[in-house]
Image (spheres, grey):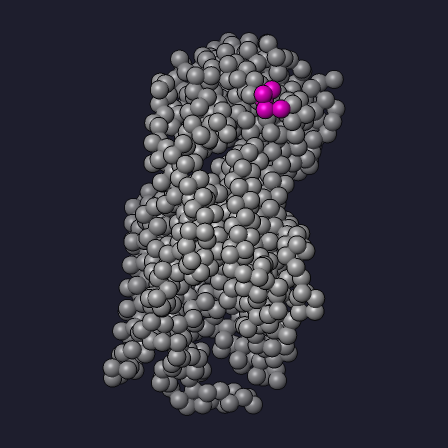
Amino acid sequence: MIQSLLVNGTINSSIYALIALGFSLTFGVAGIVNLYHGAYYMVAAYLAFTFVRINIPLWLAALLSLVGVSFLGAMMMKYPILYLKKKGENIYMLIFTLGAAYMTQFLFKLFFGARMYALPPFFNQSIQVGSETVPGPRVFAFLVAVASIVGVLLFINKTSIGKKITATSQDSYAAELVGINTQGIFIITSAISALLAGIAGIVISPYLSISPTMWLPTLIKAFAIVIFGGLGSITGSIIAAFLMGYLESFIALTWTSSMTEVAFLAVVFLFLIVKPSGILGKKTV
Amino acid sequence: MRALWKKNGITVLLLLAGVVFLLLFPVLGDDLYLLTVFSIALMYSVYAASWDLLSGYTGKENFGHAALVAIGAYSLGIISQSTPLQPILSIPLAGILSIVWGILIGIPTLRLKGPYFALATLAVASIMEKLTLSFSEVTGGEEGLYGIPFLAQDFVPSYYFVLLFAILSIGFLFFLGRSNFGLTLKSIRSDEDAARAVGISTTRYKVTAFAISAGFAGMTGAISGHYYGFVGFDMVFPLSLNIIILSVVGGLGGILPAALGAFFLTYLTELLREFGEFNQLIYTGILMVVVLVLPHGVFNLLGDFLRRGRKHGVTGR
Amino acid sequence: MALLAVENLHKQFGGLTACDHVSFSVERGERFGILGPNGAGKTTLFNLITGFIRPDSGSVQLQGKPLTGMKPEHISSLGLVRTFQIVKPFKGLSVFENLKVPTLSPRMRKRLKGEREREKWIETIADLSDLKAILQEKVDELPHGYLKKLEVAKALCIQPEIVLLDEPFAGLTSSEIQPISTVIQRANEKNGTTIVLIEHRLKEFMQLVHRIIAIDYGQKIAEGTPGEIVKNPLVVESYLGKGGADLVGP
């Protein structure tokens, strides 16, 4: 039992961390709560599926989809989101991004129908971990997730763009004053966020289903984790993702899996009331 | 009253004309379909008006209005499974229960700033949504609960019931919004610290607004249960986002613009129903365009235009 | 008994002592000034007194009644009101509506019965503050000078015993300051409202106040009449730096 919990918890947590990371990044750097974030996850999955359906090799399909979704992330920021940010009122940003996500759902329902799809697996060899036999796709998902997270962290800490991102997240006004093109940084950050969510979407699609509503539970989990870990704190998001991942496995095991979402939401709510800055977040409330 | 007339003469006339039309409609024609559409649109107008009182006036945007509707609707539904409840009992009951629920939710959440309040209310509504599905033996799950007494034996009296309720509710909310209470709420939206600095107990006002908003949402939820004779998942929970769309498109901060936005958009949705799947797409599309281009709201803009907005210069007029 | 008594008020933000055991008292009817360079802790002092920030230790008493721990809206309702350095008008509302909000506080609800009395009171304050001509204008389009007047008028609308004005002249030209200075004086001399004033515009400040305390780095460094303060070497140094007193001369 415990072995299963640990193994599944760890795999799920890594995916959650990937998704939450992007969400946290956009908030930390640009101060934007992007309710469209879950949609990037979904768009990448559908794009990959479509490419595979027209007989493009799996790896190429994945690559093209990631490029596509990153571009989408950049465009979403560049045009509507930054425009609304300038206008000031936060509520419209929330409404717009949420609306856009629903719209994407309706579009996909129209084109693809409500049927659920899947991607062919990238890697099919099961691995033995202790007494658990872990299916290949899940192992692959885990490895890719960890690699991506490490990759992003290295990118942020070691490259000059990464340093500009860090500077902008600390004080966008000051960053602007020292010559950083903050608008450009916001756009790049959004692209990276979308990319991370996209990677998650593609990597889980061999074993979880692709459907037009798949973005919403993902969004809920992402912001639950980010609120829990602290909006704006990358380390916080990662730690929270693992905590939530294990909590979810635990609840699925001891109660029912439908309660796991309630658990996530309850955590969000509790933290919002008691400690909105989360366990490690910026004190911007 | 006189001030209303002087500044907004044309608008008042148009509104009165609209009300008269709605009153006479069943007599003028025989279109049962439109009668139903209007009834539904009227209920949505009250939802929007109730949402606006809190979210438009205080600036605290409630992303989980469905939670409040659900209390009213489901209390009626659940009780009716053993003893069918008549409107005369269910509506006040729904009102009281939703007011209490509103206060309970409001007290911890209303002190949150900016998007956090929105997220908290979204969380509450989502939790209730999931629980409703989980405990389907009580709530009917996806299928819902049947056996709720109808408002009246026939469509026309039902329509008048809803119309009367809508006029009274929206009227009440409108004049409340124009009162000193409404002014205080607006000052809280504008600058909460400044309001506190001049002696206003802002938390008390916010919670009161939440409670009143909840009360009307719950009562309308009960009424819609009686109207359909049933209460269901799809009837209640999508409301959170829908009401935001309807109210934002109509315009916040005046009760009537939001109510009108809800009425006309609901009517539009019915017209578009023949387009099937496209309907939802168009709906959300409209929302997004309005948010980008006309965030002030269609009916707010219209109201300003009809008032021939006077330019205020400091040097006098 | 002093109207306002501040005793050993202390507040630290991490390593920074914003308010260092400050004590002073203000008598009823006085015009009392607080002087000090930027960052000295004057606004923090106001925030501590009016409940926007909690002090670490010390007490604030209004006519003997302790205020520590009370919420800003309750303190205001007791008659101690403050204005903000960066004006906080209620945007989207008219001047009249801005002045009406304070009259809806518990304090004023007790004193004003009915809409008519409320309107008369607002007109009186508007008259006193030179805002009568623009009562119906929306504040969003008003120039800064009028907004500063409105800021003071809003505070006066709650009929305070004592009002704390945070740089009411900031950002104004000399000719714009005069009307506001007059409003403050009128409120004090006609209605007996006690005034506590933070200001940087020294000429107008010195003419307006009876007594002053000087603050630097969160500490009270001097107390006295305008004449005494101006000659105090510590005060001069807080503005001009070490040796500044020598520059100014005896």
Image vertical order of residue C114 relative to residue C179, above or below: below
Q: Nearer the viewer, residue A236 or B125?
A: B125
Residue at image position (74%, 27%) is C65
Instruction: Tell me, yes or no, if residue C19 can be seen here.
Output: no
Residue range in magenta is: C114-118
Q: What residue sits 35% from the left and 28% below the top?
A: B310
Above or below, C16 relative to A134: above
Of C97 and B235, nearer the camera is B235
Q: Main secondary structure of the magenta part?
A: helix
Relative placement, left or right, of A228 versus A91 is right
Tell me if I can see residue A46 in this picture: yes
In the rendered image, residue C28, in percent from the top left (x then y), is placed at 67, 15
Residue A177 place in picture, x, y as percent:
33, 42
Residue B85, image x and y in percent? 67, 62
**Can you say whether B105 is above or below A129 in the image?**
above
Percent position (x, y) of residue B254?
47, 40
Left/right placement of residue B14 relative to residue C16 reads left
The quarter of the image holding the C terminus of chain B is top left
Which residue shows up at 42% across the image and 66% down it? A38
Image point 25% across, 84% down: which residue? A55
Q: Nearer the viewer, residue C243 or A227?
A: A227
